Amino acid sequence: MKSLNELLTILLLLFGSCHHCLSSLPFLRISQDFHANHYSTFDLRDAAKVESSLTRARASIRKAALMPSSTFSNIYRNAPAFYRSYAEMEKRFKIFVYPEGEPPLAHWGPCKSIYSTEGRFIQQLELPGAPFVTSNPEKAQVFFLPFSVTMMVEFIYRHETYEIPEVRLFVKDYIDRVGRKYPYWNRSLGADHFMLSCHDWGPITSLANPFLYNNSIRVLCNANTSEGFNPTKDASLPEMNLITDGYSSHHMFGGRPPLERPILAFFAGGDHGVVRSLLFKHWINGSDPDIQVHQYLPKGRKHKSYLNYMNNTKFCLCPSGYEVASPRIVEAIYSGCVPVIISDHYVLPFSDVLSWDTFSVFVPPPEIPNLKNILQSIPTETYVKLHDKVVEVQKHFLINQPPKKYDMFHMIIHSVWLRRLNIIVQK
């Protein structure tokens, strides 16, 4: 086995350390050894094969990470490492979905709401013949806990109490149940397990079990490092608001060519949280025609729709609300509008792979009063390059049914795969 320092060096070679203030922590953690408690109930030979396969994948990715990347797109932090990692994932990665639980609290989720990425992922993983899924847990590298925090909040949360003991109790009981029935949770103390939630309360729900919170891979929309999100083991989930029953998000794509967009910057949304309050204080309701900020869009035939605004805007403002994530980031990407990230402590989706600064602009919340000057100071040539990279990165945020290579489903799986590479489960 490699020393801990050597393995850390290998993992940092894959994608480098993140240099942006919003996600300054390293994205892949040092290996940890978890000792099993119940080896008598599963085949050690299969467990050894799983770890041996991951060892070969690490070596292959490490080799690719040292290759020149000048011939690849700069939307990736290390393109050769990403493509090799993706190929290794397709070749080796297996997920076991625990069958315990009943819909709607498990094996189900919302597919037409602001939490739709949660429901779409759960249901895509449940499709017959779903990629990466294995019915044999002995072959799996990770284990999915298929409960839906959003559905629990809808069906068992006592509204207006702002307390979630019933939700946490369900999660605690679920993990206790699979821990008694299968050896895998106890084998790694949950480190090779993952949950997924787009609900704001996903992080606090994971406190139901200390190993779920501290060890497991938590795939969360609310990826706030000031509230316990740990990018060395947790993964950021894109938030998007699907408003149709369609099976893909192709219909949301649009936008005028970059030099034919008359609006400099646009935002429309509720006055939620400190960041938006500051934005509204300085820019609401057309106080400057170049910075179109609205809480409610004007109504009537003469006025543009929300998507029409985005399709005609150069820079789409994406301020945090009550929580750090915003569906406007994905909406902006779909519209070919350069996202302007206005947030603190937010780890952006897929930022262990994607170089967000090649297709986004970052504005710290205290700089909101200077927003117009900041955006107008960006040279036209630079803006066009940002726009072109937005169009290039769209494929990684696209929802398909069934999933297709490099789309959002596969990128979420890849985020989990990267974090599983950071774990060694051994005797």
Image (tube, rainbow, N blue to C red):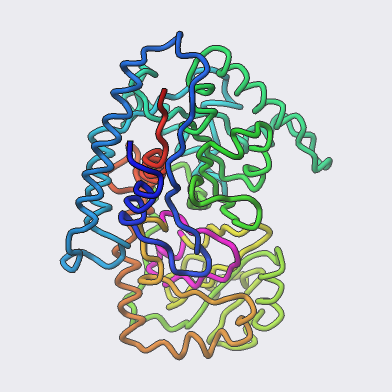
Residue drawn 25% across the image and 59% down it? 79
- Check the picture and name the quadrant holding the N terminus: top left
Highlighted range, magenta: 330-350
Residue 423 position within the rendered picture, expressed as x and y whole percent measured from the top left: 42, 37
Closer to the camera in the image, 408 or 142: 142
Q: Residue furthest right?
A: 161
Residue drawn 32% across the image and 62% down it? 77
Check the image and report above or below for 140 versus 251: above
Name the side, left or right, on which 153 lies relative to 27.
Answer: right
Is residue 345 highlighted in magenta?
A: yes
Residue drawn 52% across the image and 69% down it? 21
Closer to the camera in the image, 167 or 228: 228
Check the image and report above or below for 24 versus 159: below
Residue 401 position within the rendered picture, expressed as x and y whole percent measured from the top left: 35, 39
Badge count: 0
Is residue 261 highlighted in magenta?
A: no
Name the side, left or right, on which 277 lies relative to 6.
Answer: right
Check the image and report above or below for 42 versus 344: above
Residue 83 position within the rendered picture, expressed as x and y whole percent measured from the top left: 23, 51
- Check the picture and name the quadrant holding the C terminus: top left
